[in-house]
Image: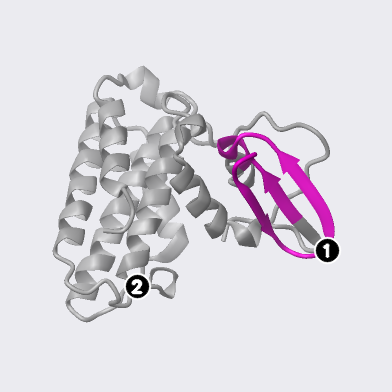
């Protein structure tokens, strides 16, 4: 696998070991979602991505979620109120299943329906899900703990968020990233803070910040 997804999965599962029911029912960093919502989504995503991998290995492609986005959202709501132990077990089992499925891959160029991509791209999708949603739990770690490698990957993935007519330049000192064309806009700060801003996550940046396009 091309991305350090195993470490991301281990980090989240370790974080869940001591969580109690009160903690998982408290608000997450995502508006309208408890931590139970976030964990249910991560587990359901892992199961859905496992199916993407298994179907690809059989020479088939399939939709990410049966019933599309409405069914995905309904399943998150249905599972969000479970106990900490149930959520912890679901995430652990689903993430282990996904790692096992990736372990069977013999050709990472096999196509999948998710984002009309390939099996290699599913690993990066999983990396983003685990890293970003671990931060969304509003516990530890935070986006300050994102590696430079992950920040640069996420910035590249989020290029479509750059507003039209803006030449966006992010200056982190030893790292400079840019995208788009038009009026220059230079933002300075730590790479993790700049990445969190582009990802729509909490950040300490101030000033006249532009509205960003939706996640791709």
Q: Which residue is mark 1?
A: 182
* Most foreground residue, 118 or 97: 118
Residue that mark 2 sits on: 118
Please name the residue shown 31% across and 74% down the image: 62
Labels in figure, total: 2
Residue 4 percent coordinates (x, y): 31, 48
Asked if the magenta segment contains residue 96, the reply would be no
The N terminus lies in quadrant: bottom left
Query: Does the image show residue 183?
Result: yes
Dot 2: few (<14), some (14–19), or many (≥20) neighbours within 10 Å? Answer: some
Give coordinates of residue 113: x percent, y percent.
37, 74
- Residues shaded magenta: 168-194
Horizontal placement of 169 versus 59: left or right?
right
Is the residue 87 above or below the residue 59 in the image? above
Task: Judge the density around disc 1: few (<14), some (14-19), many (≥20) Cα neighbours within 10 Å.
Answer: few
Residue at x 26%, y 33% (from the top left corner): 13
Front residue (pair 181, 88): 181
- The residue at 58%/43% (across/down) is 195
- Identify the secondary structure beneath mark 1: loop
Q: Residue furthest bottom?
A: 59
Tell me, yes or no, if residue 31 can be seen here.
no
* Alpha carbon separation for disc pair 1 and 2: 33 Å
- Give the number of the mark in front: 1 or 2: 1
Q: Using the image, determine if residue 58 lies above or below residue 184.
A: below
């Amino acid at each position: 696998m091309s991305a350090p997804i195993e470490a991301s999965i281990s980090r989240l599962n370790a974080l869940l070991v001591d969580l109690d029911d009160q903690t998982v029912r408290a608000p997450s960093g995502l508006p309208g979602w408890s931590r139970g919502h976030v964990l249910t989504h991560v587990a359901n995503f892992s199961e859905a991505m496992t199916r993407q991998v298994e179907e690809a290995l059989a020479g088939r492609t399939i939709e990410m979620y049966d019933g599309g986005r409405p069914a995905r959202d309904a399943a998150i709501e249905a599972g969000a109120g479970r106990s900490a132990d149930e959520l912890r077990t679901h995430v652990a089992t689903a993430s282990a299943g996904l790692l096992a499925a990736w372990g069977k891959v013999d050709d990472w160029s096999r196509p999948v329906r998710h984002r009309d991509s390939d099996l290699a791209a599913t690993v990066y999708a999983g990396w983003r899900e685990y890293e970003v949603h671990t931060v969304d739990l509003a516990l530890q770690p935070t986006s300050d703990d994102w590696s430079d490698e992950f920040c640069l990957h996420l910035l590249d993935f989020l290029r479509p968020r750059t507003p039209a007519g803006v030449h966006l330049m992010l200056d982190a000192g030893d790292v400079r990233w840019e995208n788009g064309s038009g009026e220059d806009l230079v933002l300075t700060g730590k790479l993790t803070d700049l990445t969190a801003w582009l990802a729509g996550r909490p950040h300490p940046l101030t000033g006249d910040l532009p509205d960003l396009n939706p996640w791709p």
